[in-house]
Amino acid sequence: MNVFAFAPVSVARGAAALTLTGLALSAALADEAAIRKNLAERMPGLPKIDEISKGPIPGLYEVRLGTDILYTDEQGNHVIEGSIYDTRTHTDLTKARVDKLTAIDFAQLPLKDALVMKQGNGSRKLAVFADPNCGYCKRLEKDLVALKDVTIYTFVIPILGPDSSVKARDIWCAKDSAQVWRNWMVSGRTPPKAMGGKCDTAAIERNLALSRKYKVTGTPALVFEDGTRVPGAISAGQIEKQLASARKS
């Protein structure tokens, strides 16, 4: 048998596959251009489009605006806002995508700029972005107190007005800043006034920059070891569940 007899067929098939791939790529690029053009013209108030990619359903494209997701057809004639569910796996595909986009690499967080509270052996880790005048943050703090074997890193971001900035400075400059934070958030004990000019508060500005980098626009915001990010106050039970899940990842 001539083993080389089949070589031209294989080459032909390979060339055909490459041609089809090239055509598909060209079509996708054309669709992206049409979507960008039509949405920009028809929806002038739409934020900047960061990325357009094929969606989870054939014929549907994902339009990414920062960490927000929209869906559209190949011409941008229709826009869908909402979640896509996979009924086979009972998965919210849109939420999964947003979770991936908003995930934060815990190892990259500048923990030196956080207030640190070690509870028990401190083996589990949790980061929290919080404002000292945030009511939901205070409610969350009361649940955090009950957690076992966790180290909590609190990045203070004064975003709710001038008094938040004053309190953030007073807390950061206190001798035991972590305890002063907890006393204020849990018991309402007013932080001692910081002595002017004797405390470096650059960390607070860095925290604000960090929150802008990760688009943390509200408090509280929780970040777990596996990068999962949860906006808003959640219960102690929910935190425990997420901490356990993060350790398995």
Image (cartoon, helix red, strand yellow):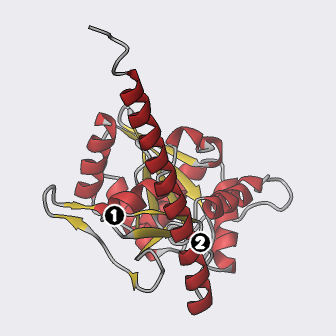
Indicate left or right for 56 with 182 as reference.
left
Q: Which of the pair 188/126 is nearer the observer?
A: 126
- Circle 1 sits in a helix, a strand or a loop, which is it? helix
Real-space Cα separation, disc 1 to disc 2, in angstroms: 26 Å
Indicate left or right for 24 with 88 as reference.
right
Q: Which of the pair 66/149 is nearer the observer?
A: 66
| Nearest to N terminus: mark 1 or mark 2 | 2
User: Which residue corresponds to the image point at 42% horizontal and 64% vertical from the top-left?
Assistant: 186
- The number of discs equals 2
Q: Which of the pair 6/239 is nearer the observer?
A: 6
Q: On the image, numbered disc 2 is attached to which residue?
A: 33
What label does residue 95 carry, if any?
Answer: 1
Check the image and report above or below for 42 versus 236. Answer: below
Q: Which residue extends farthest top?
A: 1
Check the image and report above or below for 5 versus 231. Answer: above
Q: Taking the image as drawn, is residue 77 in sight?
A: yes
Mark 1 residue type: Lys
Image coords of residue 215 (percent x, y): 58, 65
What label does residue 194 carry, if any?
Answer: none
For the N terminus, the image quarter is: top left
For the C terminus, the image quarter is: top left
> Residue 72 falls in which quadrant of the image?
bottom left
- Circle 2 sits in a helix, a strand or a loop, which is it? helix
Q: Which residue extends farthest right?
A: 197
> Residue 166 falls in which quadrant of the image?
bottom right
Q: Count residues near mark 2 (Cα–Cα under 10 Å), then give few for <14, some for 14-19, many for 20+.
A: some
Image coords of residue 151 (percent x, y): 44, 41
Mark 2 residue type: Ala
